[in-house]
Image (cartoon, rainbow, N blue to C red):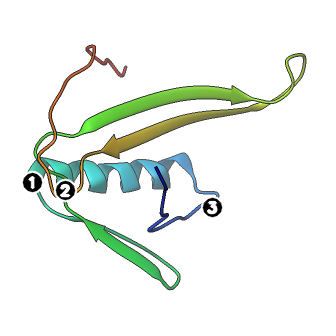
Amino acid sequence: MSEEVLFESEAMHSTGEVADYLRRVADNLDAGDAIALKAGGQSVTMTPPDRVEFEVKAEREGPASGDGELSIEFELEWPENAAASGSGGSLEIE
């Protein structure tokens, strides 16, 4: 299966700025509104269906015996032109 990147943005932000971005996404999801992403000359607008696959991943990259890079990734995924279904285990974020 091939992958086409429709939008990508990577930059340093304060944790407060990241919280603002995530809050806007959450508000749009709650309202059933489209999510518009814009950075530089790039933009994409997507409207997730009522049910999406939600993946949360915590990773550490780097040498086994030294400092590495930590990350938390959030991903929403759904079939294009189809209603999403399915369920996984119960997720808790504290």
Task: Give whichever of 32, 86 is nearer the camera.
Answer: 86
Q: Which residue is mark 2?
A: 28
Residue type at the position of mark 2: Asn
Q: Left or right: 80 with respect to 33?
A: right
Are the residues tagged 2 and 1 within 8 Å (C-beta)?
yes
Are the residues tagged 1 and 3 within 8 Å (C-beta)?
no
The label number, if any, that marks residue 40 in the structure image: none
Q: Which residue is drawn at the image coordinates 28% and 14% (left, top)?
A: 89
Quadrant where the image shows the C terminus: top left
Q: Which residue is mark 1?
A: 31
Across and down, in percent, residue 77 comes to: 31, 44
Q: Whole-Å distance between the Cαs marked 3 and 2? A: 22 Å
Q: Which residue is mark 3?
A: 11
Relative vertical location of residue 56 with respect to residue 48 in this rendering, above or below: above
Are the residues tagged 3 and 2 within 8 Å (C-beta)?
no
Work out whether mark 3 precedes mark 2 in sequence or the reverse, and give the earlier one.
Answer: 3
Residue type at the position of mark 1: Ala
Q: Which residue is drawn at the image coordinates 49% and 56% (left, top)?
A: 3
Residue type at the position of mark 3: Ala
Q: Secondary structure at mark 3?
A: loop
Q: Left or right: 90 with respect to 2?
A: left
Q: Which residue is drawn at the image coordinates 16% and 58% (left, top)?
A: 81
Crowding at mark 2 (Cα within 10 Å: few <14, some 14-19, many 20+): some
Q: Secondary structure at mark 1?
A: helix
Q: Residue furthest front?
A: 1
Q: Left or right: 49 with respect to 22?
A: left
